Each structure stands twice: as C-alpha cells, then as structure tokens.
Image (spheres, grey):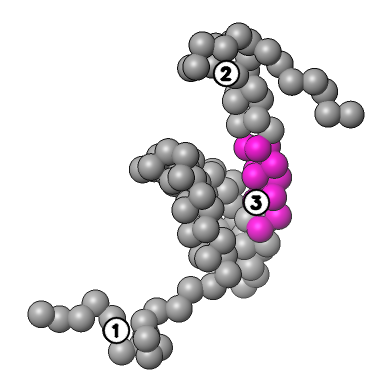
Amino acid sequence: MTSSKTTADPPGGRQYGQDALAVARAVARCTVWRPGGTCGVKASADREANLVEQVVAPQLRQRGPGARDAAARTAWQIGPYLAAARDVVESALAEAGLATAPLRAGGTNVRPADPA
C-alpha cells in the first residue's frame, strides 16, 4: 500500500493556513445544526468563485506582463463585495422564510422587536 503523502509534505503531514482552519471550524459549527448540510455551502462558494473568474477572464486574456497580477488584484477586490451581497441576500431570504412559516413546534408567526 502506498502513502498519500508526497515527499514535499512536511514531517507529520500537510500543513494548512489560517483560512483553512477557519473554514474547518465553520463547517464543524454548521454540522451541529444540520449534519451533512454543508454541501450547499460548498456549492455556493464554488459558484461565487466561478463568478469572480468570469469577471476577471477578460483581464487574463490580455497579453501584457501585468495582466495576471491585475486579474488577481481585481479578484481580491471583488471578493469582499460579493461576500457582503451574499450575506444580505441570505439574511433577507432567511427572514422571509421565518416570517412566512410557522415554527415546527406549533408556535405562531411572531417577529422579534427591532434591535435599536
């Protein structure tokens, strides 16, 4: 049987950065509420990455020496705006869903007071 580690891996296995750790922690928290329910999150993240790639594709097709760097800068600039838009949309959809669906325990539709 062969090992999946390559000779380039550091002793003890592959090491990941802080971003990967943050993702792993978030996934662990999500699975507490809905085991196995992170596939939709991954699909959403993949769609966002594809959207950013589509936006920077014209820059990548340029032949200039700085085209790749310009595309990378654009991608990093778009990311926070896309994440903020996603958060607003997800919050609005969740709020709309909660407002129209009775609680599973048989409660009534009661909206919380505005956090002032």
How many numbered marks does the figure carry? 3
> Counting residues from the N terminus, which is met first, the one under dot 3 or under dot 2?
3
Q: Secondary structure at mark 3?
A: helix
User: Quadrant of the rendered structure where residue 84 is?
Assistant: top right
Residue drawn at x 69%, y 50% as measured from the top left: 80
Residue drawn at x 51%, y 11% as measured from the top left: 106
The image shows residue 2 at horizontal and vertical percentages of 15, 81
Q: Secondary structure at mark 1?
A: loop
The reply to whether dot 2 and dot 1 touch (C-beta < 8 Å) is no
The reply to whether dot 3 and dot 2 touch (C-beta < 8 Å) is no
The span shown in magenta is 76-87
Question: Is residue 79 inside the magenta stretch?
Answer: yes
The image shows residue 36 at horizontal and vertical percentages of 36, 43
Three-letter amino acid code at the position of disc 1: Thr
**Residue 6 disc label:** 1
Instruction: Determine which residue is flagged by label 2.
Output: 97
> Counting residues from the N terminus, which is met first, the one under dot 2 or under dot 1?
1
Alpha carbon of mark 3 to alpha carbon of mark 1: how far? 32 Å
Instruction: Determine which residue is flagged by label 3.
Output: 79
Alpha carbon of mark 3 to alpha carbon of mark 2: how far? 27 Å
The image shows residue 56 at horizontal and vertical percentages of 59, 52
Give whichever of 115, 41 is nearer the camera. Answer: 115
Give whichever of 74, 8 is nearer the camera. Answer: 8
Residue drawn at x 65%, y 43% as measured from the top left: 82
